[in-house]
Amino acid sequence: MSCYAIGLDFGGGGGRCLLLDLDTGLTTTAARSWRFPRAPGTSGLGFDVDLERTWSLFAEATREAMERAGAGADEVIGIAATALRLGNVMLDARGEAVLAVPNRDARAIGPGLALGAQHGEALYESGGRWPYPIHAAARLQWLQAERPDDFARVSDLLSISDWLAFKLSGERACDPTQAGETLLFDLARRSWSDEWIERLGLPRAIFPVIREPGERLGQLAPAAAQDLGLRAGIAVAVGAADTQCGLIGAGAIDTGAVAAVAGSTGPIQLVADRVLIDPARRLWTGLHAIPDRWVIESNCGPLGEALDWFARLLFPDAAQPSLNLLGEAATAPVGSRGLVSSLGAEVMNAKAMGLPVGHLTLSHLSSMDDGSPRRFLVRSVVEGMACALRANLEQILELWGGAHAPLRLTGGLSRSDTFVDIVAGVLGKTIVVPQNADATALGAALCAGVAAGSFPDLRAAADRMVRSTERLPAAEQAGDNAALYARWTKLRAARREADVEAAMLTIPFALDAHRDNEPS
């Protein structure tokens, strides 16, 4: 009889259930996709989460994963959830949602900009974030001003992973990694910031108790067990934010460990043993799922999202356009015959974040005689993303200044040998690739395993369950890759003002696209 733990992963494009065999380390996954509906009356800025539908899809995925693994309900001993950061669910006293929004919801643009103008520096020092409309502090102020009756109903502010834990167990709590995304959390003390909650005129009672990832939050409620096809009473663990769960699932535990979760977006986090605040205000500082550890983060922006979009543009009839793109990129030489791309390749500046824009710089003369010139174009896009990974990593290491481990590369894009090889080449260093690319869902399952008593703590869980391989850069391509990164960096610096102008020109069209699809 096997023994399993389950990790539920709530992402921007869908949900995933991962079933982890605690004896062998083998995993079985099932996924469902979704889109967030646009919120009416928000001028294209607001998005909602359909909680009932997403829960139903998780139930389907869980039952499918169990069936595919041949696992019985009596063999599952624990479950935990992770979710995208900067999403919120505000509950009333009865457990009904007053507001449920994903990370891209920016309806609180007014309060968000006001917080930055009035308190940006102070909030950055205490919470490691420059204020934006997507932070819970701004959303609470928006709800208080725009829908005061609904605001008065709010009993608990939760992240989406906290809400999933509530749905599983009936217990209301928040983990520190998600609480650290609100602007209302003191990083150094690892607790809610009573000072900022009071200064912003928010009720302290709506901020739930903090529980550490891997703790046993409660037990699986009968209704949830029936939906998921599981046994009531199994351990429900506190999970963590998706990137931090990804660190656990990638084995990035110790001080100086660094990992990139290359999925829809491209966050890179380094594990620190102290709170470090970037004096240049470019980076984020947050909390690791491991107690007494923090993270320094830089983000490459919409890596996978942009790659998928571009692949659909070039390979519209392909069953899996991104695989076609990556396969064709592998046939082109390093440097892409001088084509340079910044599509989906941001270098983070937390104080001046804006609409992601990208450019393709090319001349047809460099490949006009080639029989398959598209390969240079697609490789340049992947190389630009690899350059962004290096540039963001360099920002982190500049602040860290100490010894660090090799970069661990996980997430959906790490499944591609082409992507991994291009990243290794551009970085010019060995990278570590966890064998399980579903590191975020795996991290949640490891939280469940700890809560169920299979591991003493998350460090031991990762040590036992995370297996990795190393990928070395091709030595003969070192000079070409160095020249590529130099060109990309020089062109990015020269284009900085043009990027700002391009974003301003694009914003009205992006908003119009949202309004055109806004429910009537």
Image (spheres, rainbow, N blue to C red):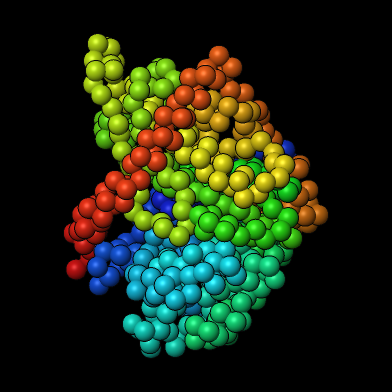
Instruction: Please indicate, yes or no, whether residue 220 appears anywhere in the rendered image.
Output: no
Res. 394 image quadrant = top right
Q: Which residue is drawn at 73% across and 48% down?
A: 255
Measured as percent of width and height from the top left, residue 450 is found at 74, 55
In the image shown, does 11 or 230 lie closer to the viewer? 11
Measured as percent of width and height from the top left, residue 383 is found at 43, 30
Q: Which residue is drawn at 74% across and 47% down?
A: 254
Q: Residue at x 39, y 18 (%)?
A: 332
Give the farthest residue toward the right: 456
Res. 209 image quadrant = bottom right
**Quadrant containing the C terminus in the rendered view:** bottom left
In the image shown, does 435 or 310 lie closer to the viewer? 310
Res. 351 image quadrant = bottom left
Instruction: Please indicate, yes or no, whether residue 402 appears anywhere in the rendered image.
Output: yes
Measured as percent of width and height from the top left, residue 425 is found at 54, 25
Measured as percent of width and height from the top left, residue 426 is found at 52, 28
Q: Which residue is drawn at 56% across and 79% down?
A: 196
Instruction: Using the image, determine if residue 257 lies above or below residue 173.
Output: above
In the image, taking residue 401 as reference, residue 361 lies left or right, namely left
**Quadrant containing the N terminus in the rendered view:** top right
Q: How many marks?
A: 0
Instruction: Using the image, determine if residue 516 lies above or below residue 322.
Output: below
In the image shown, does 110 or 282 lie closer to the viewer? 282
